[in-house]
Image (cartoon, rainbow, N blue to C red):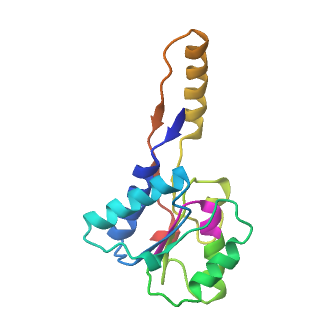
Amino acid sequence: VVGSDNAQGGYLVTRHLIERGCRRIAFFGDTSHPEAGLRFAGYARALAEAGLPLDPKLQQSFLFGDTRIREVIDGWLDQNLAFDAIFASSDVTAISIMGALKERGIVVPDQVRLSGYDDIGLAAHVHPPLTTIRQPTERAGRALVDLLFESVQAQPRRTVMLPAELVERESSR
C-alpha cells in the first residue's frame, strides 16, 4: 500500500487556519471514509492543541463524489452558523463551497478562509486560488513501482507512507 499521511495533512491545514486567526473552523467530509476520517482526526488534533472546541455543528458529512454536494452545502449554509474557516476534505468540495459562498456574497478569504485537499490541477486556477494539501503523486507512483518489483522478487510486503504538504494560496491568506 502507498498512501499519504492524511492525518498529518488534516493537522497541517487546520493548524494553518488557526495560525491565520480562525477559531470556528468547519469540516466537510465523510468521516466514515478511511482517508477523510484520518483528515478529520488531524483536524480534531489541531483544534485540541489550540484549545478550541470540536463543535459537531461545524461538521458536515457527505460521501466523496456525491452528486448532491451543492444541496448539502446550501443546506448547511442555510443554518446561519458562525464560522470563519472551512476545511473541505477534497478540492472538488472546496471549489463547490467557494461557489456557494460567492453566491451568498461571502468573500473568500476576507470573510471566510477556505482550504481543500488533494491539490488537483484546477485548485491553482480558481479565484481565489485554493489553499490545499498536496499529495505527492509522482513519488507515490515511483513507490508503487518499487513495491511491485519487491513483490516480484518475493520480498516481504510493506506499506509506504508519504508526507502531506501544505500549499498555501490566496483562499486562506
* Residue 122 horizontal side relative to residue 14, left or right: right
* Residue 17 horizontal side relative to residue 78, left or right: left
- Count of numbered circles on the image: 0
Up/down of 52 relative to 64, above or below: below
Residue 88 in the magenta stretch? The answer is: yes
Residue 97 or 108: which is nearer the viewer? 97
Up/down of 162 relative to 75, above or below: above
Looking at the image, which residue is at 62% across and 83% down? Answer: 75
Residue 129 in the magenta stretch? The answer is: no
Q: Quadrant of residue 61?
A: bottom right
Quarter placement of the N terminus: top right
Looking at the image, which residue is at 44% across and 52% down? Answer: 9
Residue 33 percent location from the top left of the image: 56, 54
Q: Which residues are magenta?
A: 85-95
* Residue 149 horizontal side relative to residue 133, left or right: right
Q: Quadrant of residue 93?
A: bottom right
Residue 153 or 34: which is nearer the viewer? 34
Q: Residue furthest right?
A: 67
Residue 91 percent location from the top left of the image: 60, 61
Residue 57 percent location from the top left of the image: 46, 80
